[in-house]
């Protein structure tokens, strides 16, 4: 383990000497992640990007990219762009990144099943804001907005999310 790693523990997400409360997928942890199972995949996941809503959040780092009105994330295993950011209009199943709620105001992207995706293995695993403490996600890791922002300002491309 490296000092810049984020490590999921039973008490929360450990990062830079702090343990931040977090929520994981409704399906718990899984070594056999599948699309729609709601599980957070075990493994070592690299941080590969960061997205933010410029109309709601100040740019947290110089490498964060703004989420535009047409930005989507493909979650359809039959889509040639499965598990990639796409733009509307898009004829396959997808998630809207520019949501009405604040869930994706700040999104940290991991390399789960990316950049070469295996259909059905599960689309993106993000770190994002939680709905409320303890409320499960669809497989992502969710944190309090202030903890997510604190973390976003400190991570680098060398940071890894370790889910044992």
Image: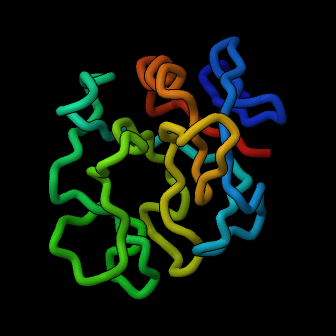
Q: Residue at x 44, y 22 (%)?
A: 149
Up-down: is 105 above or below 58?
Answer: below
Residue 94 rendering spot, x and y as whole percentages = 35, 71
Q: Can residue 2 be seen in this view?
A: no
Up-down: is 87 above or below 160?
Answer: below
Q: Residue at x 66, y 19 (%)?
A: 3
- Seen from this angle, which residue lies furthest bottom? 78
Q: In the figure, is residue 86 to the left or right of 20?
A: left
Q: In the figure, is residue 89 to the left or right of 13?
A: left
Q: Which residue is drawn at 52% across and 41% down?
A: 127
**Quarter of the figure that contains the C terminus:** top right
Q: Residue at x 21, y 76 (%)?
A: 90
Q: Is residue 159 visible?
A: yes
Task: Compare residues 98 and 121 and report the one nearer the observer.
Answer: 98
Residue 103 rendering spot, x and y as whole percentages = 42, 43
Residue 130 rendering spot, x and y as whole percentages = 54, 39
Residue 40 rendering spot, x and y as whole percentages = 68, 55
Residue 13 image-quadrant placement:
top right
Up-down: is 126 above or below 17?
Answer: below
């Amino acid at each position: 383990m490296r000092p810049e790693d984020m490590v999921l523990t039973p008490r929360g997400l450990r990062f830079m000497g702090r343990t931040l409360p977090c929520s994981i997928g409704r399906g718990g942890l899984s070594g056999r992640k599948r699309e729609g199972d709601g599980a957070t995949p075990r493994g070592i996941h690299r941080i590969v990007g960061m997205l933010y809503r410029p109309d709601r959040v100040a740019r947290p780092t110089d490498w964060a990219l703004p989420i535009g009105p047409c930005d989507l994330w493909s979650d359809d295993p039959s889509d040639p762009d499965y598990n990639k950011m796409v733009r509307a209009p898009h004829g396959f199943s997808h998630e809207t990144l520019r949501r009405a709620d604040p869930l994706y105001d700040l999104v940290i992207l991991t390399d789960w099943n990316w950049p070469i995706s295996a259909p059905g293995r599960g689309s993106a695993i993000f770190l994002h804001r939680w709905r409320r403490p303890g409320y499960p996600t669809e497989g992502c890791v969710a944190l309090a907005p202030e903890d997510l922002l604190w973390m976003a300002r400190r991570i680098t491309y060398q940071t890894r999310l370790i889910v044992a």
